Image (tube, helix red, strand yellow):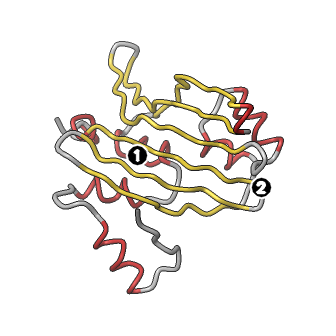
């Protein structure tokens, strides 16, 4: 597990660079270290709108948390769609605002979209990075005055090769 502070000092940047798994492509490095919405960055990389599709979402009442699984899909056409990311989010109910939780329960938007639409001020902190021959993944936390979420995103290296029309 790593804890990379947000302050962009030389030491912090070196710590981040040293924590990156070896043999990443430039696209993979940008994706793993990006601190904005994944949906926006993936839309830019794949040169088409990337949509959020909620696969499963459960409220675990004893634990006071919502567990949400989604996929991000680059939709070139109805017959040509590429799943570019699978993600799991752990959303503690007591740490997040009622408005945010309502939007999560509606399942209509991604977390980044919800945060942008509610003008919530927040920070993202990378917790861990992983890569093997098939996937690259990151685990990060989003925190703010009325938001606290932990997200794990997994990206297929094969799908990332298709970014920008590269096959």
Taking 19 as reference, is 100 above or below it? above
The image quadrant where one finds the N terminus is: bottom left
Q: Residue at x 52, y 31 (%)?
A: 69
Taking 144 as reference, is 70 above or below it? above
SS category of the residue bearing label 2: loop
Q: Residue at x 37, y 53 (%)?
A: 31
Q: Which residue is mark 2?
A: 146
Q: CA distance from mark 2 to mark 1?
A: 29 Å
Marks 2 and 1, the one that precedes in the sequence: 1
Q: Residues within 10 Å of mark 1 (few under 14, many from 20)?
A: some
Q: Which mark is residue 44?
A: 1
Question: Measured from the top left, where is residue 61 in percent x and y?
Answer: 74, 31
Q: Residue at x 46, y 69 (%)?
A: 3
Question: Measured from the top left, where is residue 98 in percent x and y?
Answer: 83, 42
Q: Residue at x 52, y 22 (%)?
A: 55
Residue at the far bottom in the pictured view? 10
The image quadrant where one finds the C terminus is: top left
Q: Residues within 10 Å of mark 2 (few under 14, many from 20)?
A: some
Residue at the far right in the pictured view? 98
Question: Measured from the top left, where is residue 59 in percent x and y?
Answer: 69, 29
114 with respect to 139 (left or right):
right
15 or 119, nearer to the observer: 15
């Amino acid at each position: 597990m790593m804890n990379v502070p947000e302050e962009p000092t030389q030491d912090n940047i070196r710590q981040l660079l040293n924590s990156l798994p070896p043999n990443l492509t430039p696209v993979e490095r940008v994706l793993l270290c990006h601190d904005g919405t994944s949906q926006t960055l993936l839309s830019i990389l794949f040169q088409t709108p990337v949509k959020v599709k909620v696969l499963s979402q459960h409220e675990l009442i004893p634990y006071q948390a919502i567990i949400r699984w989604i996929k991000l899909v680059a939709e070139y056409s109805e017959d040509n769609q590429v799943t570019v990311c699978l993600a799991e989010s752990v959303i503690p109910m007591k740490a997040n605002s009622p408005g945010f939780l309502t939007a999560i329960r509606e399942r209509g938007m991604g977390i980044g979209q919800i945060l942008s639409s509610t003008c919530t001020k927040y920070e993202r902190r990378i917790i861990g990075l992983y890569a093997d021959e098939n996937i690259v993944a990151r685990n990060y936390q989003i925190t703010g005055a009325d938001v606290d979420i932990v997200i794990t995103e997994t990206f297929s290296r094969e799908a990332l090769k298709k970014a920008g029309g590269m096959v």
